[in-house]
Image (spheres, grey):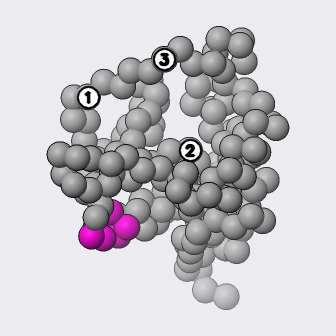
Amino acid sequence: MSGAPPEILVRDARLTDLETLARFNEAMAWETERVRLDPRTIREGVLAVLADPAKGRYFVAERGGEAAGALLITYEWSDWRNGTFLWLQSVYVEPAHRRRGVFVALFGHLERLAAEPGCCGLRLYMDAHNEQARAAYERLGLRHRGYLVFESPDRLRAEGS
């Protein structure tokens, strides 16, 4: 056996990934925002995406044959560009696989998708205090463009979760 690092394979998520994706989402919400997601709700939400590609698309990165990370893309139509932005969401890499190229592989996969006709770019939002994520995104060439994100009150926080 060589000392080469395990290859990273990025693939579309399958129904059999439901529990892994839900667990990744729960861990990411806790790590980044100290929010505990309702297990039933997150599983129903992940299942809704897996069952309906119009809602989004999950990708799983496998390293050494195990799920090492994942992310979700959703879509935003831009009339200004006559194209679709891919929004990165629910990005998570298992702690044992961090800084081993997993997110780089996932992001590279998305860059190829974003280069296809009809797509006009990649976007994401992140917690403003997540400096580690910000540094990772900037290393990959993403830049803050000066937009602020506004939203209605967050039901998760309003319920005291």
Of circles 3 and 1, the one toward us is 3
Whether residue 158 is in magenta: the answer is no
Residue 92 position within the rendered picture, expressed as x and y whole percent measured from the top left: 58, 48
Q: Secondary structure at mark 1?
A: loop
Give the residue type at disc 1.
Answer: Tyr
Is residue 68 shown to the viewer in this render? no
Instruction: Name the residue carrying label 1.
Output: 147
Q: What span is colored magenta in the figure?
A: 112-117
Give the residue type at disc 2.
Answer: Ser
Which residue is outermost to the left? 80
Q: Secondary structure at mark 2?
A: strand
Whichever of labels 3 and 1 marks the residue nearer the N terminus, that label is: 1
Task: Decide which of 33, 76 is in the foreground and name it.
Answer: 76
Distance from Cα at disc 2 to Cα at disc 1 = 20 Å
Distance from Cα at disc 3 to Cα at disc 1 = 17 Å
Whichever of labels 2 and 3 marks the residue nearer the N terminus, that label is: 2
Residue 24 position within the rendered picture, expressed as x and y whole percent measured from the top left: 68, 47
| Residue lying at 28% horizontally and 64% vertically, measured from the top left | 118
CA neighbours of label 2 inside 10 A, class few (<14), some (14 to 19), many (20+) = some
Instruction: Name the residue carrying label 2.
Output: 90
Instruction: Name the residue carrying label 3.
Output: 152
| Residue lying at 67% horizontally and 88% vertically, measured from the top left | 1
| Residue lying at 63% horizontally and 33% vertically, measured from the top left | 29
Residue 61 position within the rendered picture, expressed as x and y whole percent measured from the top left: 58, 65
Which residue is outermost to the bottom? 1
| Residue lying at 69% horizontally and 67% vertically, measured from the top left | 14
Q: Tell me: 92 left or right of 125.
A: right
Q: In the picture, which quadrant includes the C terminus?
A: top right
Residue 56 position within the rendered picture, expressed as x and y whole percent measured from the top left: 53, 54
Is residue 146 shown to the viewer in this render? yes
